[in-house]
Amino acid sequence: MAGRYALGIDIGTTNVKACILDTKNNRVVASGSQEHPLFHPKPGYAEQEGDNYWKAVVSSIKQCFCQGNFAEDVAAVGLSGLVGVMLPISADGKPLRPGMIWMDARSEEECQEIRDRVGEATINYINGNRVAPWFIEPKALWMKKHEPDLFEKTHKLLSPSGYCTYRMCREFTINTGDAGLFYPYEYQKEAWNPDVAERIGIPMDKYAKIYRSHEVVGQVTAQAAEETGLKKGTLVVAGGTDISSAALGCGVIKAGQAYYSMGTGSNLGIMIPTEQRVEEYRILKWPHVLPGLTMFDGPMAFTGVSLRWFRDMFADQERLIADRSNLNIFDLLTQQAAKIKPGADGLLYLPYMGNTLSPNWNSQAKGVFFGFRLSTTRAHMIRALVEGVAFDLYSNVKIAKDAGVRVEELTLNGGPTKSRFWNQITANVTNLPLNVTDVLEAAPLGDAILAAVGAGHYSRPIDPVDSLVNIVGTVKPDPQIHEMYEEFFAIWRRIYFNLLDEMKDHHELLYKYNFE
């Protein structure tokens, strides 16, 4: 059993994070991170370059190796990544175009084609999910229609982690979690359904071979070793989705457990047995990295990024203070918002700065502030941003409960969940206790655990979790504040539904006049 260390790497929407796990002492001994760009070439478009993923992966690995002499003793590596990305790869392993990522909304027409050819009920039953631009096949059909030469040259459709796994070991693979975002994947059988692929219009040979997350798919090549600093022959496992790896990394490993993960977007993930059928498709289903578990998952767009938008557009003064005083700019912003009482004096925010995912699935949705008055300040806007994101989460919590899925508490993960202010608002809005762990970055830790299983250091992914993950606090909701939020939540939902026609017409004008 060569090497005591395992390397985990998670490719997020805006940055890559990596960590090295010492499997003898069950502790993280090094970490690294690197941002990568996101492009919006037209209204509704959202793209990223496959090679930018890889460059960020390489940088994050090298940052880890700068913190100690680990490279020669890394036994295995595992990668996870953002989901809902259509990344076409040629036979010689090169990206043919930028990947259309989960927030890309150009393929509504192709969604209707899939409904007509296959039927949404069939997709629901086979794949467990709905038809929406967030998934892979609508984007692939858009490419087939508008870029037919590129479609014909496509050898495999890979995820970001699948592409970077290929760069590690030169094997075209996909893990069960990423496969769950492809409609021909039968989530209760862990297999492709060729009939669904044929009816959609995607040749079956464009899909990669499926592996479970902890399974070894190859070894680091000489070229990848030279680029990353890893030793040639280091084992490479299949990895997982960013969300399912994060669930493992923060200790959500049993049916009935749930978590809330926040980054650029956010996810409510509730664990259910794979054999359990939940007839609710506003919330998605895809495989956990643990066989036998499915994640009943509500993805939400433009959540953490809402506060980042405010920072970029309106926080020049706070940026100067943060730079001069070595402070966190987000702390400076939320300190202002904390001075405003719960409810933001009636100011409401719909966090739909490009579209909305679960539960509305509306690519034409728009961000809205409602309730401005002469007394409204920047601090009110900041508080309303955080409360609006929590309302979006609460809408999914209510739907899950109505579907018969038990949600009693949430385990937290992700950058914004490090904020006590943000967490208290989330607890008060949802009326759920929130468990805070001592894990800094859950997804790369989950990947490192999977890699360690592939190398034989652990028999099962759940084996080291108790020693790696500790609950260090619980944020409890205030029932009285929740009652107030419940009333404003009802208005918040009505605002969205009352503006549907206006959002649609507004969206059409954006295209007509090419506003970006």
Image (cartoon, rainbow, N blue to C red):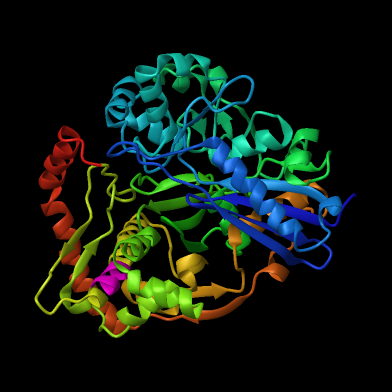
Q: Confirm whether residue 240 shows in the render.
A: no
Q: Residue at x 59, y 63 (%)?
A: 441
Q: Nearer the viewer, residue 55 or 497?
A: 55
Magenta residues span 381-387
User: In the figure, is residue 368 to the left or right of 99?
Assistant: left
| Residue 381 % position (x, y) | 24, 71
Per the picture, the main secondary structure of the magenta-coloured stretch is: helix
Tally of numbered tags? 0
| Residue 150 % position (x, y) | 46, 18
Q: Residue at x 84, y 64 (%)?
A: 24
| Residue 384 in magenta stretch | yes
Q: Quadrant of residue 177?
A: top right
Q: Quadrant of residue 90?
A: top right
Where 185 falls versus 2 (above or below)? above
Q: Residue at x 63, y 47 (%)?
A: 57
Q: Nearer the viewer, residue 109 or 68?
A: 68
Q: Confirm whether residue 510 shows in the render.
A: yes
Q: Residue at x 18, y 72 (%)?
A: 487
| Residue 242 % position (x, y) | 55, 50
| Residue 192 % position (x, y) | 55, 27
Q: Residue furthest right?
A: 1
Where 117 falls versus 402 (above or below)? above
Image quadrant holding the C terminus, namely: top left
Where 273 falls versus 494 (above or below)? above
User: In the figure, is residue 317 to the left or right of 15?
Assistant: left
User: In the figure, is residue 98 to the left or right of 346?
Assistant: right
| Residue 115 in magenta stretch | no
